[in-house]
Amino acid sequence: MLPKYFKPKNEYDLIRLGQDNDGGYLVEKKSIENSKSLVTLGLGYDWSFEKDFYSLTKKPIFCYDHTVNYSAIKKVSRKFLFSYIFRIFKPKYIFKKNFFKHLFKNTLLFRDYKLFFSTKAKHFEKRIGSGQGGIKLEKILEDKRDLCPLFLKIDIEGSEYRIFEEIIKYQDNFTGIAIELHDVDLHLEKIKDFFEKLNMELVHIHPQNPAFVTENNIPTQLELTFAKNPVPVSSEIKIPHNLDQPANPNLPEIELIFE
């Protein structure tokens, strides 16, 4: 079971940014409206959240991920193309919902990347953290001083725990935070300490259903969203929220159980 501090205290005015299933996050509406910009730590091959943020706000977007660049995305798009060519001869794929939508989206990913990150957002090939090739959150905020407060989105595959202290130290620069936590069962004390020091409200929680659940019912991968001074819309909490979607639509949602 998840400790009770993982359960939001109220229902808030949430909106969904990002694509269906994996890649979409529920965020508190005012925390987006009150932000001057978006900083994304960890981009991968999905920037649908960033595109929705821009469509909604037209505000600056800055993304940091050392694993992504135009050449890498071109190779990924080529792999998708060969994969879809193989599937196109199989009726079970052809008649699957959104097959052609995903075909064009994934095989033209490199074009979408080039267009979006040359006109509406900026991508920096930087690893989050100290050391060679890294950039610390402190430096990012120093460079974006005039664009704070900002909304912060984090998905850095387990390295999020390394920057907990920086997030706490500079939390006054954020209107809200969307963060994906990995190996939750191994880091409960760190997460509890983070919750206690963060002067924000937890407004949403959603488990990632591709990840496993431990024997004592702790999902090992969670999406959490925080907001500064959110206004409750109800004391009745909906978990899952009606805007939630399973990361993998072929797997059932994980039921959250709190102590």
Image (cartoon, rainbow, N blue to C red):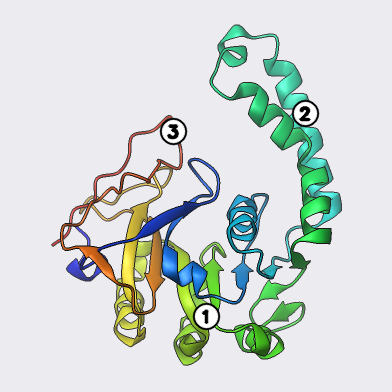
User: Where residue 142 appears, x then y in whole percent?
Assistant: 67, 91
User: Where residue 95 appears, x then y in whole percent?
Assistant: 57, 12
Residue 159 at least partly seen: no
Q: Left or right of 43: which side holds 243?
A: left
Label 1 SS: helix
Q: Residue at x 77, y 54 (%)?
A: 116
Q: Above or below — where is 256 with respect to 64?
A: above
Q: In the image shown, does 7 or 251 lie closer to the viewer?
A: 7
How far apart are labels 2 and 3 at the CA level? 22 Å
How far apart are labels 1 and 3 at the CA level? 31 Å
Label 3 SS: loop
Q: Residue type at mark 1?
A: Ile
Q: Residues within 10 Å of mark 1 (few under 14, many from 20)?
A: some
In the picture, the disc for residue 163 is 1
Q: Residue type at mark 3?
A: Pro
How far apart are labels 2 and 1 at the CA level? 37 Å
Question: Going from the N terminus, do you reach mark 1 or mark 3 first?
Answer: 1
* Location of the N terminus (image quadrant): bottom left
Label 2 SS: helix
**Mark 2 highlights which residue?**
81
* Location of the C terminus (image quadrant): bottom left
Q: Residue type at mark 2?
A: Leu
Q: Above or below — where is 259 with respect to 242?
A: below
Q: Residue at x 52, y 79 (%)?
A: 162
Question: Going from the N terminus, do you reach mark 2 or mark 1 first?
Answer: 2
User: Where residue 39 appears, x then y in whole percent?
Assistant: 62, 72
**Mark 3 highlights which residue?**
249
